[in-house]
Amino acid sequence: MTPEQKSRYDRQIKLPAIGEEGQQRLLDARVLVIGMGGLGSPVALYLAAAGIGHLVISDYDTVEESNLQRQVIHTQDSINDLKVDSAKKRILAINPDIKVTTLGYELDHEELASEVALADAVVDCTDNFPSRFQLNKITVKLKTPLISGAAIRQDGQIATFDSRDAANPCYQCLYSDNNLEGVTCAMEGVVAPVVGIIGTMQAQETINVLLDRSALTGKLMLLDAQSLEWQRIQLPKNPNCPICNH
């Protein structure tokens, strides 16, 4: 670690749970973030600030004015730009010390699997069930930890699925129906801070996972933002799950 890095990350290095060894682990880590929208915005910003050495960000959408209500990594000047390009500018403005790889196109199954295989952790910031099921299937097969978040209206949820231990449940243990049709923010609306809360939690849990201190493996946290109440639920492994019990 360089003197400049020690100065930049001083407030984290001071923590007994991190220290210089933990900070070096973060600097050596490669994290794949799928989705640069409401959830991906705080995830990318905070992981960059915390010193994750290599962020790979994936999104093939472009910035629209309606995104700016909650997708805080983008600005008015980013409208019509690819979200990954807009996000990379903000990330490097915060921390030019890290590497950012952009994937501004829709990945096919093989490309996605290749990226997951290279990652130390995958953060699911997508907004639809087909993408979540696909990510779950690949991360289970490759035994890569998956930090999953979702938010709609004034509700949010976050969980970690870590198949490195076969006793842990996967995302499909939680949602067994492959044919689920989810609602979107465009359909139902969302209060801006809700995605910020869940995305920030995902960033913290990603750091926990990279430091082998996961707080949410096998657990689901549910947020009712209107009442500011949280629920923590233990997730059982489904013995008949077609993904993690085959």
Image: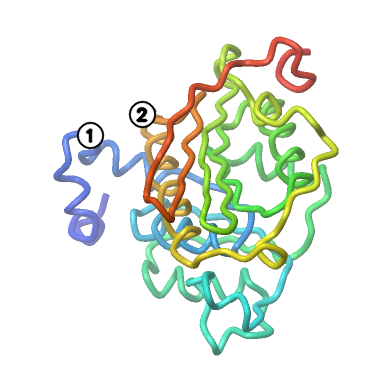
Tag count in the figure? 2
Q: Is residue 13 above or below residue 74?
A: above
What amino acid is found at the position of numbered circle 1 in the picture? Ala
180 sits left or right of 35 in the view: right
* Corner quadrant of residue 19: top left
Residue 232 higher or lower than 200, as above or below: above
Q: Are marks 2 and 1 in contact (CB under 8 Å)?
A: yes
The dot on residue 213 is 2
Residue 218, given in percent of the width and then of the height, sits at 51, 23
**In the current view of this chain or complex, which residue is farthest to the bottom?**
77
> Which residue sits furthest left?
14
How crowded pointer 2 is (Cα within 10 Å; few <14, some 14-19, many 20+) is rated as: few
Task: Estimate the x, y position of residue 77 in percent, counting from the top left.
Answer: 55, 89
Q: Which residue is mark 1?
A: 17
Q: Is residue 107 left or right of residue 192?
A: right
Q: Give residue 212's mark.
A: none
The colour scheme applied to this rendered structure is rainbow
Q: Amino acid at mark 2?
A: Arg
Q: Residues within 10 Å of mark 1 (few under 14, many from 20)?
A: some
Q: Kindly identify the residue that appears in the image at 68 percent across and 54 percent down.
A: 127
| Distance between the alpha carbons at the discs numbered 2 and 1 | 9 Å
In the rendered view, would you say 187 is above or below 56? below
Task: Residue 174 in the image: state x and y as whole percent.
Answer: 65, 28
Which residue is painted at 85% across and 38% down in the image? 179
